[in-house]
Amino acid sequence: MRKITVITGASSGIGKEFAIQLFNLYEKLSEPREIWLLARSKDAMTEISKSLSGNNGKIVVKVFAIDLAGKQGALGFNEILQKEMQDSPLEIERLINNAGFGTYGPFEETSTERELSMIDLNCTSLTGICGFSIKFMAKDSYIINVASLAAFMPLGNFAVYAATKAYVLSFTVALAAELKPKGIKVCALCPGSVSTNFANIASNGKRKLVWHGKSPEKVVRDCIKKSISGKKIIITFAKWKILAFLSRFIGKFTVANYTFKYSERPY
């Protein structure tokens, strides 16, 4: 039985870091593994694949260039699974749902089509990929859905993104309860600002870097460790944990209103 790790949004940032760290983890094991990288950018993933080598070829890195957005993206992922199954049986050992993006700016001033595309990728695709993957999972399999610190409160100038991540968090915790009897562990990774290409995309190139971004290496390392221990919601740094905790006591409109007035983002 082939043991597979699936990483979506694997061409850069957190997804790329998961590929690197899990490859290094699997190098220490005797059993062969496969790591599947899924994203739109084939060239970027091919470079990652080339950089990962060792263990006498026991770890195979496969690249799948695919637009995962929406129902069609999830169905496309299922087609990959069905095609791969024709070669030999497989078990999904880890699923990392990392694909997603955000858009800065007040809702009425941002592209409605872009906001809908965000929902398609952040919510619809993630849900479908989980649904199709579970059929290939067994006891001690893992699902890691990448949510955000933004999942804990509605945010002005970031309204749809925060809402999509609130969905991911809620869905993930419920799924963890449903799959616990099967021995499948499910967790939501809820990072704050991380040094990736996120801000560049969210701002349409007007902000190249994430302000006060934390190391993706530390975030991913912490996530892998805590997911193995069975943690359901993973927040890496103390500051992020404090903000998530305080969200229980501050009115949702108060936060949304404050961030709308005082947390302007370029767009």
Image (cartoon, helix red, strand yellow):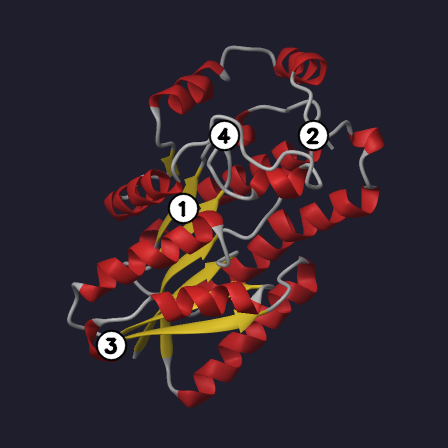
Q: Are marks 3 and 1 in contact (CB under 8 Å)?
A: no
Q: Position of residue 118 (x, y in %)?
A: 69, 46
Tell which circle, 3 or 1, labels the residue nearer the N-terminal end: 3
Residue marked by disc 1: 176
Q: Position of residue 267 (x, y in %)?
A: 74, 33
- Say which residue appears at 46% left-offset and 14% top-offset: 246
Tell which circle, 4 or 1, labels the residue nearer the N-terminal end: 4
Q: Are marks 2 and 1 in contact (CB under 8 Å)?
A: no
Residue marked by disc 3: 58
Is 151 above or below relative to 243?
below
Q: Amino acid at mark 1?
A: Ala
Q: Gap between marks 2 and 4, in whole Å?
A: 13 Å
- Mark 4: give few (<14), some (14-19) or many (20+) Cα within 10 Å: many
Q: Gap between marks 4 and 1, in whole Å?
A: 19 Å
Tell which circle, 2 or 4, labels the residue nearer the N-terminal end: 4
Classify mark 2: helix, strand or loop.
helix
- Say which of 4 and 55 sits in front: 55
In the rendered structure, the answer to whether residue 71 lies left or right of residue 32 reads right
Residue 126 falls in image quadrant = bottom right
Tell which circle, 2 or 3, labels the residue nearer the N-terminal end: 3
Q: Gap between marks 3 and 1, in whole Å?
A: 31 Å
